[in-house]
Image (cartoon, grey):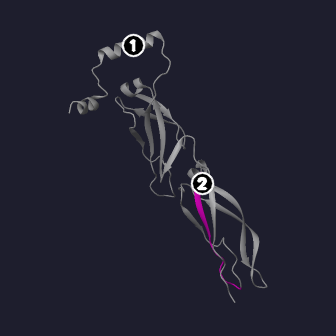
């Protein structure tokens, strides 16, 4: 009697770079299959497969014909791979988009600057406009995950302001001069609330 092969399922944990660029994997599994004399037996199951670039966290990939062996001419089963992507020290993934923190000094945020920003495809020059705020997202179009010929995701640099923790006398004096010259009130909304 012809019996189609069983479908198998396996969790595959990829590094960020493997998911972004694609990779080849040799999977060693233990699988159940029909024994010639009937009944089930556990056998080693080795599969070599290509993971396409741009796979995302939680995605399920189907690898046709790489499951259990069919008997008496019946087709082999399929293998389903549940994709998990390891955390990266710089990048966070949401769908096809990538997020990275961009630390800026207060004067870089106020005056604008150009920074060298690492991306998974290499460094790029990113222009930071004057008056950029903390938490603002600067978008690099098409620098996210790309699947086949589909539309690529974006990379977002999220601005984080970093204050210097050590100041010499001259720097402290410059901050004093700025404080005296500035009419900027970062707590204006709190003052309005307090007067109600």
Residue 183 image position (x, y, % from top left): 27, 20
* Quadrant location, the N terminus: bottom right
The residue singled out by tag 1 in the image is 174
The crowd level at tag 2 (other Cα within 10 Å; few <14, some 14-19, many 20+) is some
Query: Label 2 belongs to which residue?
Result: 22
Q: Nearer the viewer, residue 149 or 74?
A: 74
For the residue pair 69 and 196, the one nearer the viewer reads as 196
Residue found 67% across the figure and 58% down from its top: 25
Please rate how many residues cluster around mark 1, counting C-alpha atoms within 10 Å: few if below 14, some from 14 to 19, many from 20.
few
In the image, taking residue 164 as reference, residue 195 lies left or right, namely: left
Looking at the rendered structure, which numbered label has been put on residue 99? none
Highlighted range, magenta: 72-85
| Placement of 32 over or under 162, stated as above or below | below
Q: Which corner quadrant holds the C terminus?
A: top left
Q: Position of residue 94 (x, y in %)?
A: 47, 51
Which residue is painted at 39% across and 34% down in the image?
Answer: 134
């Amino acid at each position: 009697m012809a019996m189609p092969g069983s479908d198998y399922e396996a969790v595959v944990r990829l590094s960020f770079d493997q998911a972004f660029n694609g990779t080849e994997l040799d999977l060693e599994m233990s699988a159940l299959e029909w024994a010639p004399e009937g009944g089930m037996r556990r056998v080693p199951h080795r599969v070599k497969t290509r993971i396409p670039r741009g796979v995302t966290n939680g995605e399920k990939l189907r690898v046709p014909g790489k499951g259990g062996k069919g008997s008496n001419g019946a087709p082999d089963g399929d293998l389903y791979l549940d994709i998990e992507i390891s955390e990266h020290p710089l990048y966070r993934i949401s769908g096809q988009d990538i997020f990275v923190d961009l630390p800026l000094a207060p004067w870089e945020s106020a005056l604008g600057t150009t920074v060298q920003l690492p991306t998974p495809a290499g460094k790029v020059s990113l222009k930071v406009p004057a008056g950029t705020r903390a938490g603002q997202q600067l978008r690099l179009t098409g620098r996210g995950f790309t699947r086949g010929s589909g539309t690529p995701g974006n990379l977002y640099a999220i601005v984080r302001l970093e204050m210097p923790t050590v100041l010499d006398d001259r720097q402290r004096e410059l901050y004093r001069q700025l404080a005296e010259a500035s009419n900027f009130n970062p707590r204006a909304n709190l003052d309005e609330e307090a007067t109600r």
